[in-house]
Image (cartoon, rainbow, N blue to C red):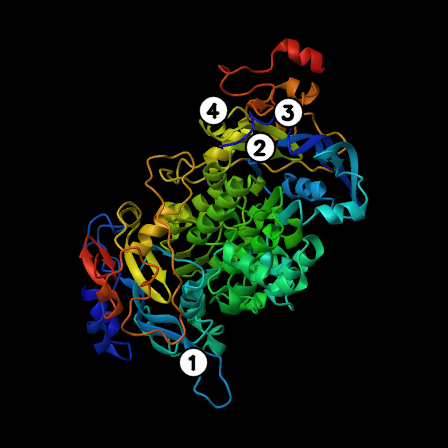
Amino acid sequence: MSMTTADPVPLLKVEDFGLEFRTRSGTVHALEHINLAIHKGETVGLVGESGSGKSVLSYAILGISDRAARITAGSALFGSLNMIGADEKTLADIRGREISMIFQNPRTALNPIRKIGKQIEDVLRRHAAVRSEDLRARAVESLRQVNIPDPERRYHAYPFELSGGMCQRVMIALALACKPALLVADEPTTGLDVTTQAGIMDLIKELASERDMATLFITHDLGLAADYCDRIVVMHAGHIVESAPTRTLFERPRHPYTAQLIAATPARDSVLETLSSIPGNLPDLRRGDLPPCRFVDRCTRATPVCREKPLPPIGLEATASVACWHPLDQAAPALTENESAVAA
Amino acid sequence: MNMSTESVATAPSPGLLNSTTVINPAPGVFPGAAPEPAAPPVLLETVRLNKRFPVGKLRGAKASLLYAVDDVSLRIHAGESVGLVGESGCGKSTLVRLISRLIDPTDGAIVFSDRDIGGLPSAGFARRPERAKIQMVFQDPTDSLNPRYTAFDTIAEPMRLLSPGGADDLAGRVARIAEDVGLPPELLQRFPHQLSGGQKARVGIARALAVEPQLLILDEPTSALDVSVQAIILQLLARLRRERGLAYLFVSHDLNVVRLLCDRVIVMYLGKVVESGPAGQVFKHPRHPYTRALVSAIPKGMDEAQGERIRLSGEVRSPVNPSPTVCRFYGRCPSGIARCAQEMPLLRDLGEGSAAACHLA
């Protein structure tokens, strides 16, 4: 599985990271106290509802945040380079070569009026030391690698001539053309049918193990995350609320939000009557008086302490941890009163 | 199967039905497949329905034809919930657009309540009384709601145009339907951007129900929703169907959702129906090799009881001018034999309400 134990130095280390958006209707406290480490060869799933900050976090790591974004705290170390505050030229050299991203919607992420083969050549020309006469062969090779049938012919295709699944494969070919060390995949299979989805996820997984590539896999599909991730990080309203190895998370979810997410995901043996939804919405992140636990208004286990005492954020360790004063399954080590006193 | 003979009498080519297997036998014939013990009448039936699109026409050369929907015969009974699944490009959307009369078929009949509506031009269909009986709930509520209409306007519009009551007591009728779909009355004056995803989904459902349809076509109604509200919308759909006796044609990529909401499942592959049967049966014992691959690709989660995934290799056959004698799945099919390249398998009745189009099923 992962190299976590063998390699103590993570490839990417996000520490105490915070980000807000300045908007006309107020400041949106989008991310707070985010700690996240990804090791070589590891696949980490980032799950949560839309609006929980998954994409905002991944954009920030790549330094492609919206202009309204302001980083309030923390760092994102990739190797020895802090991606936060690095100059644009350095970032541009790293993006596409060492860190690549697969975007949510391939139809809007690809250039609609440029042949897909040419788009892959563009990446190679910018980032890899490839002679111009070899470019074409390398581009065709990239297309073949993502199992696009008849790559010589598809080289000349425009995105509109390809199906959604094929476009997604082209996105993956683009992202992997320079053999990145870290792949950020933002909902790479949303909207695709299950057979295509399985094919694309297998492909990412195979390439990851072949090249020891680390993957940050953003999804709202817990079933899919369970199939492909070594470790899962659960986000809610800009906080990481739980982080655990995949099996542990599904067998013994500690945070009430995680448990409710799992219960809301239709599975093989689900019955409609018992399938639950999560009441309430994400809190308005523009509020100035957000409680320390942002799940408190939707939580059945909440007590006054949840609104008062600041929660110690989830650390960088790869073991299971939860940010909750009343976690489920007390058998596992929970925050003790002593720890909480220290945190307070 | 008496029902079918009756309904086909009004179709333009009644003799055709005998040469094809109808894939939705009357429920009641097979216990367990039916929502009710007495067989409800057939609400909608397609008879050898075809839609072919011309593609790649070059200087006077004869245009090639893309067989989007190829010889599809199916039945939906009153009050029945039918799931339609298959990979993108298999013709699900074309079939749904044919049935909802947004596009015209190349040939074949669409019989709704014993009347062939396949021949009515889609251009004027929006003003016909049948429009009220077949309604759609679209995939993304954000894209399918008019951003300049309030929730009230969105729901009232079809009532004004299509319902017999016209504009009488619109406020009261809109309020009642809003209550029925669980949309708080204070939200009726809001615009789509002021509503959450779940609320927008409710508006889309209320709009479809406003004219009291008998058949609701749901195109991925929950795929744009968060899992946190998905369950509540699915439960709402199940309740509305029960209370109003609606029939559903439910299109979805999420097979776990189809399993929750549907009595029967129809599987399409490259324009053809390859399998149909009671939902439980299709998911537990898929008969067609494509269905087996599809079911095996459902994310397992932590459920280890599920078997190994079947990986499909080989290229998808082209839907342009396909050979009439080669199985569409041949070349990708893990169990293909020589016969599959010489003879197109027809949909065969396999008993217990199931049918599959495979020589080996």
- On screen, residue B178 versus residue B121, left or right, reads right
Label 3, label 4: how far apart the Cα atoms are: 17 Å
Label 3 neighbourhood size at 10 Å, few (<14), some (14-19), many (20+)? many
* Horizontal and vertical percent position of residue B353: 22, 55
Pick the residue in front: B207 or B352.
Answer: B352
Residue at 48% across, 26% down: A248
Q: Amino acid at mark 3?
A: Ile
Verify CB contact (< 8 Å) between mark 1 and mark 4: no
Do badges 2 and 1 share one subunit? no
Residues packed near mark 2 inside 10 Å, few (<14), some (14 to 19) or many (20 plus)? many
| Label 1: element kind | strand
Label 1 – label 4 distance at C-alpha: 57 Å
Determine whether label 2 and label 3 are within 8 Å by CB: no
Q: Earlier in the sequence, mark 2 or mark 4?
A: 2
Q: Chain of mark 2?
A: A
Q: Amino acid at mark 4?
A: Arg
| Residue at 61% across, 38% down | A281
Which numbered dot is residue A314? 3
Q: Which residue is mark 1?
A: B64
Q: Which residue is mark 2?
A: A233
- Which residue matches tag 4? A252
Task: Work out how far the residue at label 2 is from the one at label 3, CA to CA, in angstroms.
Answer: 10 Å
Residue B80 shows up from this direction? no
Amino acid type, mark 2: Val
- Relative to A274, A160 lies left or right: right
CA neighbours of label 1 inside 10 A, class few (<14), some (14 to 19), many (20+): some
Tags 1 and 3 both on a single chain? no
* Chain label for disc 4: A
Give coordinates of residue B274: x percent, y percent.
30, 61
Q: As rendered, which of B356 and A228 lies closer to the eye?
A: A228
